[in-house]
Image (cartoon, rainbow, N blue to C red):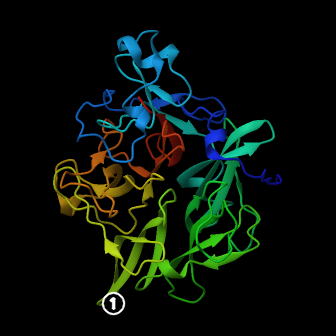
Amino acid sequence: MRTLRFYGTLSLAALWAHVGCGEPFTAGPAAATSSSGSGGSEGGAGSEGGAGGASSSASSTSSSAGGGGAGGCEACKEGEFCTVTETCLPCNDRRGVLSFGPLTEIDVEGTEPSFPRVRAEVGEDGATQRLVYVARFGGASDTDIATATGRPWTGGEVLPSEQINTDRPESGPLLLPVDVALPIGDMPPGSLLFDQRLPGPGSLPSVFTADFPEGARVEHVDELFVDAGSHSVAVAHALSPVRYWFMSIHQDSGGTVSRLFTKRAGGPAVQPVDIKLPGGCPAEGADLAPWVTPDGRLLFFQAPYSALGDCAQAVVLRSFYVKLGEDGLPASDLPATILLPNEPPRVAVKTPSLSPDECTLFVASNVGGAQRLYSAARR
């Protein structure tokens, strides 16, 4: 097993000056496997007045966006995407409908990988990205948390910490930026959040945090233990105090029901998050796998979905995003927007997240048969 290395901290502003994410990351031979994006959208098209939290650069785009596409897509800089009219816009321009291009497989180790989550780091050769995900390894039935670094990502390996990867299933990994610490004890910046079942028969999952990558210290996140258990946490770490979104498990009549909740760190109020899908069905399921932008204004999630609006028959997991207000709840009564809408209805698209510069979408999907990880560039 290769040795994992952690290279210290660097401000994200400085780091992303050296990292571009306008093209998908791959490992090994990269081939587009699916033409899955919706038609590319111009910033402002179909806008609800501009998504809150979008960078001010969205209203005054870079010089390469001038002239209605002067210079073509080749003129786009790092941190920009190219529209169908060959106009370069910042990836954090959230006006209009977010659209992404063809899916490209990320060739990592493990069976049925999911929950791809990415952060920027400093590597041996400068700026890099670290991927964390969950998968089954060595024929095991339980999932473990694994990681890969580099550009492109190659291989991937299970985190060696026996306190993180136990004999119980782990899931929902989320790495904080290297310069961000949560108000949880004295856990250092850049820690890992993840789910793990508590010891004992019939136990339900709960959220933990650990120093990364060593995993020498693991602490239970007490304030997210609501009702019978909790899992799949998302964090808007740019807010002060930070805001969490997570799944909570409620025991009722001998069974369990999972719901999505949100709360501010240190705050007493826990609010249910009710989201409507296209067609009118509610976003429900055992795990919506939430992921949120650092400013807490865009929530990405998965949910069982039926293109025909048949809520009772919705079984295939698809991915969506919804705009949020300052209270962490949907900003309007409009339904969530489906991601990669051109994928066939029977294809699952799961556990979505964005790269730190919002240029790339990451998902798990069975589009090629077996479930694998994929990336798709903003367009």
**Spot occupied by residue 147 in the image (x, y as percentages of width and height):** 67, 53
Q: Nearer the viewer, residue 247 or 374?
A: 247
Q: Nearer the viewer, residue 135 or 293?
A: 293
Residue 73 visible? The answer is yes
Give, as a three-letter code, the residue at label 1.
Gly
The image quadrant of residue 197 is bottom right
Residue 100 visible? The answer is no
**Spot occupied by residue 108 in the image (x, y as percentages of width and height):** 64, 46
Residue in the image at 26% along x and 60% along y: 275
Residue 117 versus residue 269 in the image, above or below? above
Question: What secondary structure is found at the residue carrying circle 1?
Answer: loop
Q: Is residue 35 left or right of residue 137?
A: left
The image quadrant of residue 283 is bottom left
Tell me the crowding category of disc 1: few under 14, some 14 to 19, or many 20 or more residues within 10 angstroms, Cα based.
few
Q: Nearer the viewer, residue 146 or 298?
A: 298
Q: Is residue 58 left or right of residue 188?
A: left
Residue in the image at 56% along x and 77% along y: 221
**Spot occupied by residue 302 in the image (x, y as percentages of width and height):** 37, 56
For label 1, the residue is: 254
The quadrant the C terminus occupies is: top left
